[in-house]
């Protein structure tokens, strides 16, 4: 399989991520302490254009292939999971520009410092002349502390109180977009893992949203950009990105365990590097991590080829990504667990590179892209529709 940077556009994004990784590593303790990315880290991400990896080229973005986006996140995650998580979240959110009116998209994403974040799907928006009004609160807004724009996914109520229904019979969900200054932020992110993401809540009171600031996101009938990247939904891209973040965390944790094993020696006990059990465990864990990475990247590669060929990702293609993302996150968590336990008592000290990654990895494994019911969904599809894509032949 080709290196992701060889796939197509966005040359240099992965190299830029590697170049700023030492800065992010140095800021990681402060990110953890303050529960948000530091100004130095945000500036580095902005100055290197990393937030714009998935933004359409027509608005100054890179419109990069998924594999480039994934490896960029993987490199950042090796330095700090919270930074990678925020970067992944806000980068995918920028795909909304492909559904907005061009003038609105330029207003929201026109400057390099423009960043948008959003929370979970919740609440109704009331249709009024010229747009919508809403009073509501949303949770789980990763990256919102760096954002100058916020979004929210809402169902539409007509003026008579009835729910707006799409032609296919499902409720219409719109993504409303508004300045972060219009919202009240609520500092609620007191958690055990991904502490630095600042995944707080936000609320608005009787806020008016103009019609052209309410996008039919992930509804391909409303898509304004024609590039193959936008044949992917944001939900699918989240799966690819967060799987990559988990791989970066696992890689850094296993590398730390290997480094410890090379050095650690207890009185009366053979050095870890000379212990046959440790040697075998490292070999098997290395194989597990490499296998998970190869599976996730090959699935993304096949999806990208389908997009290049057809402009759309099939239901089977989406299911394949859902499966690979879920499996990759679970395998990465097992790698981190193994490395953590291999380190013994050393791992519990905050001065060592284990305990934060252990907590971060298990926070990743708790979120929606890692839910076990994804296996059930894909298993049902296999049983009813014969097969899903199995990745390219190598």
Image: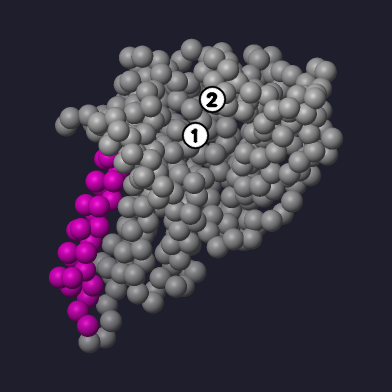
For label 2, the SS is: loop
For label 1, the SS is: helix
Q: Nearer the viewer, residue 87 or 123?
A: 123
Residue 235 - label? 1
Residue 201, position as x, y percentages in the image: 69, 48
Magenta part of the chain: 269-295
Query: Badges 1 and 2: C-beta atoms under 8 Å apart?
Result: yes
Identify which residue is drawn at 56% across, 43% down: 86
Query: How far apart are the alpha carbons under marks 1 and 2?
Result: 8 Å
Residue 8 seen in this snapshot: no
Q: Indicate whether 358 appears above or below 264.
A: above
Q: Name the residue under label 2.
A: 218
Residue 332 seen in this snapshot: yes
Q: Indicate whether 104 appears above or below 386.
A: above
Main secondary-structure element of the magenta-colored stretch: helix
Q: Which of 392 and 53 is in front in this view?
A: 392
Q: Does the magenta stretch include residue 293?
A: yes
Residue 203, position as x, y percentages in the image: 76, 43
Identify which residue is drawn at 54% across, 39% down: 89
């Amino acid at each position: 399989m080709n290196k992701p940077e060889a796939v197509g556009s966005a040359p240099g994004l992965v190299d830029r991520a590697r170049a700023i990784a030492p800065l992010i590593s140095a800021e990681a303790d402060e990110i953890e302490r303050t529960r948000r990315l530091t100004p130095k880290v945000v500036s580095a991400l902005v100055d290197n254009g990393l937030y714009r990896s998935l933004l359409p080229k027509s608005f100054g973005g890179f419109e990069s292939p998924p594999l480039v986006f994934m490896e960029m996140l993987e490199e950042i995650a090796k330095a700090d999971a919270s930074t990678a998580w925020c970067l992944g979240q806000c980068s995918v959110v920028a795909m909304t520009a492909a559904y907005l009116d061009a003038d609105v998209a330029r207003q929201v994403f026109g400057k390099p410092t423009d960043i948008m974040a959003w929370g979970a799907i919740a609440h109704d928006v009331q249709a009024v002349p010229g747009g919508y009004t809403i009073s509501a609160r949303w949770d789980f807004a990763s990256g919102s502390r760096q954002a100058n724009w916020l979004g929210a996914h809402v169902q539409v109520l007509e003026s008579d109180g009835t729910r707006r229904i799409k032609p296919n019979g499902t409720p219409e969900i719109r993504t409303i977009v508004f300045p972060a200054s219009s919202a009240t932020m609520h500092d609620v992110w007191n958690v055990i893992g991904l502490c630095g993401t600042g995944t707080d809540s936000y609320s608005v009171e009787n806020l008016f949203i103009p019609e052209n600031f309410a996008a039919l996101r992930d509804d391909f009938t409303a898509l304004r950009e024609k590039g193959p990247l936008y044949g992917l939904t944001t939900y699918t891209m989240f799966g690819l990105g967060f799987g990559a973040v988990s791989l970066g965390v696992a890689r850094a944790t296993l590398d730390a365990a290997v480094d410890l094993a090379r050095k650690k020696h207890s009185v009366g006990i053979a050095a870890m590097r000379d212990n046959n059990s440790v040697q075998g465990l490292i070999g098997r864990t290395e194989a597990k991590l490499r296998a998970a990475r190869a599976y996730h990247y090959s699935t993304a590669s096949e999806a990208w080829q389908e997009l290049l060929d057809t402009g759309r990702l099939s239901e089977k293609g989406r299911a394949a990504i859902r499966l690979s993302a879920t499996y990759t996150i679970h395998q990465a968590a097992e790698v981190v667990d193994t490395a953590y336990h291999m380190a013994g008592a050393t791992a519990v000290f905050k001065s060592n590179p284990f305990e934060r990654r252990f907590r971060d990895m298990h926070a990743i494994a708790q979120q929606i892209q890692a839910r076990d019911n994804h296996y059930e969904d894909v298993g049902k599809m296999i049983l009813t529709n014969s097969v899903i894509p199995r990745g390219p032949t190598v």
